[in-house]
Amino acid sequence: MADKEKIIGRIRAIQLQEKELPSIPVFQFDAGLKAGFKAALELAKATVIETEAEQIPVLIEKQYQQLKNIYSGVSGVPGNIRPETLSDKMILNEIDLAVLQADFGVCENGAMWINQKHLEIPALPFICKYLVIVLEQSSLVSNMHEAYQRIKLPVESFGLFIAGPSKTADIEQSVVIGAHGPIGLTVFLI
């Protein structure tokens, strides 16, 4: 214990000169917000569909009609799986489709922020077979600098950025979609 206290004492005795933090320049996103966001997500192998909120249930039914176990955290979008009905969290891997609401999207990289109020099951976006994210066009921001300003810490104790379906490129140097999580991501931009 004495050695530990000596080391800590020496560290505390070091007098460092205060330095000003560097100023962060304002980065402008050259493309239009919606066009840039769509391009970034498509590059990440996600599907982006512009639609009205009322059309989402119809589009999901049409696109994912073969799927049985659907979780929906979006008002007006039906699902047949609720967290309180799950007796064992291990059956999360049986969820075919998860429909989640994002708070905002980032145009420079296609990332979408989903906070704790939209994530009843934090592991859900990583363990479902297919993922649908609903995002309002008016909530797009240009870059990650703006995105971080919108996150309200410590009010939001948990949240995450999602930018495309799961993928890896370490298998024979070719990209494999759905390797560690959802096979596909569809974003409904309303």
Image (spheres, helix red, strand yellow):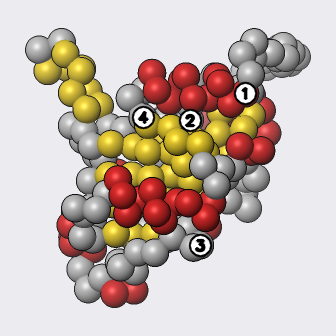
Depth check, mark 2 against mark 4: the one in front is 4
Residue 63 visible in this rendered orientation of the protein:
yes
User: In terms of secondary structure, where does tag 3 sit?
Assistant: loop
Give the residue pinned by disc 3. 75
User: In terms of secondary structure, where does tag 4 sit?
Assistant: loop
Give the residue type at disc 1.
Leu
Mark 3 is surrounded, within 10 Å at the Cα level, by few (under 14), some (14 to 19) or many (20 or more) other residues, namely few
Depth check, mark 1 against mark 2: the one in front is 1
Give the residue pinned by disc 4. 46
User: Which quadrant holds residue 93?
Assistant: bottom left
Q: Residue at x 64, y 39 (%)?
A: 105
Q: Are marks 2 and 4 in contact (CB under 8 Å)?
A: no
Residue 111 is marked as: 2
On the image, the x and y values in percent for residue 40 come to: 54, 24
Foreground residue among 35 and 62: 62
Depicted 179 relative to depicted 88: above or below: above
Q: Residue at x 51, y 70 (%)?
A: 77
On the image, the x and y values in percent for residue 76 come to: 57, 73
Q: Residue at x 62, y 29 (%)?
A: 37
Q: Earlier in the sequence, mark 4 or mark 1?
A: 1
Foreground residue among 123 and 79: 79
Depth check, mark 3 against mark 2: the one in front is 3
- Cα separation, mark 3 vs mark 4, equals 23 Å
Give the residue pinned by disc 1. 33
Depicted 110 relative to depicted 22: above or below: below
Residue 19 visible in this rendered orientation of the protein:
no
User: In terms of secondary structure, where does tag 1 sit?
Assistant: helix
On the image, the x and y values in percent for residue 38 come to: 57, 29
> Image check: 92 left or right of 141?
left
Q: Earlier in the sequence, mark 2 or mark 4?
A: 4
Q: Earlier in the sequence, mark 3 or mark 2?
A: 3
